[in-house]
Image (tube, grey):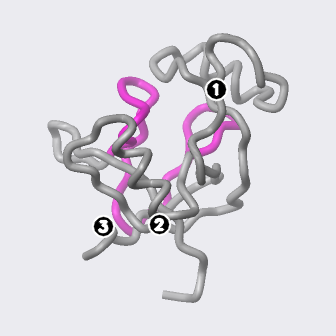
Amino acid sequence: MSKQELFYKVVQKDHEGNWRSAFVTGKLSLVYKEKKWTYPVIKNSKIFVFQDIYCAISFGKVIKLDPIIIFECLAKKPEEIAYVCNTRYVLENAKKFWQSPSLLGRGPDISLSPPGSMTASAIKLIKIYGT
């Protein structure tokens, strides 16, 4: 593997054994495969990752994951983002957010991004952290 910067993705296993986002569930949840690039399905959207393992672990604790599973991953076009859309189950709200995330710094559906979070245009899971 080349010397690319590593990021971290907090995931969970679904009932079919697929790796999925630990935060976004239902229709909006992406399926991640090890060593394959995953791209968002909502137009203009991004995938959230963490730039720091400790921030990823903290996020797993905040959303009460047990166990907390974190993958090391590669990210295409990583960039910081200030806000996130809280309504993770509502497709229309997510679409509106990604149409103009810079304008949505207020309102009940928007909150500050978790510490250390970033977005990427695609990610590739490498291996489970610590293995």
Task: Name the mark nearer the viewer: 3 or 1.
Answer: 1
At 46% across and 64% down in the image, what residue appears? Answer: 53
Task: Name the mark nearer the viewer: 2 or 1.
Answer: 1
Check disc 2: other Cα within 10 Å, few if <14, some if 14-19, many if 20+.
many
The kind of residue on which mark 3 rests is Ile
- In the displayed structure, would residue 55 be above or below residue 96? below
Q: Position of residue 83 (x, y in %)?
A: 69, 33
How many marks are shown on the rendered structure?
Answer: 3
The kind of residue on which mark 1 rests is Ser
The disc at residue 128 is 3
Check disc 3: other Cα within 10 Å, few if <14, some if 14-19, many if 20+.
some
Assess whether residue 46 is covered by the magenta stretch. yes
Q: Which is nearer the N-term, disc 3 or disc 1?
A: 1
The kind of residue on which mark 2 rests is Cys
Q: Mark 2: which secondary structure? A: strand
Which quadrant of the figure has residue 95?
A: top right
Write down the region rendered in magenta. 20-47
For disc 2, the marked residue is 73
For disc 1, the marked residue is 111
Q: Position of residue 54 (x, y in %)?
A: 45, 61
* In the foreground, 112 or 85: 112
Q: Main secondary structure of the magenta part?
A: loop
The disc at residue 60 is none
Q: Where is residue 29 in the image (x, y as percent from the top left)?
A: 41, 34
Q: Mark 3: which secondary structure? A: strand
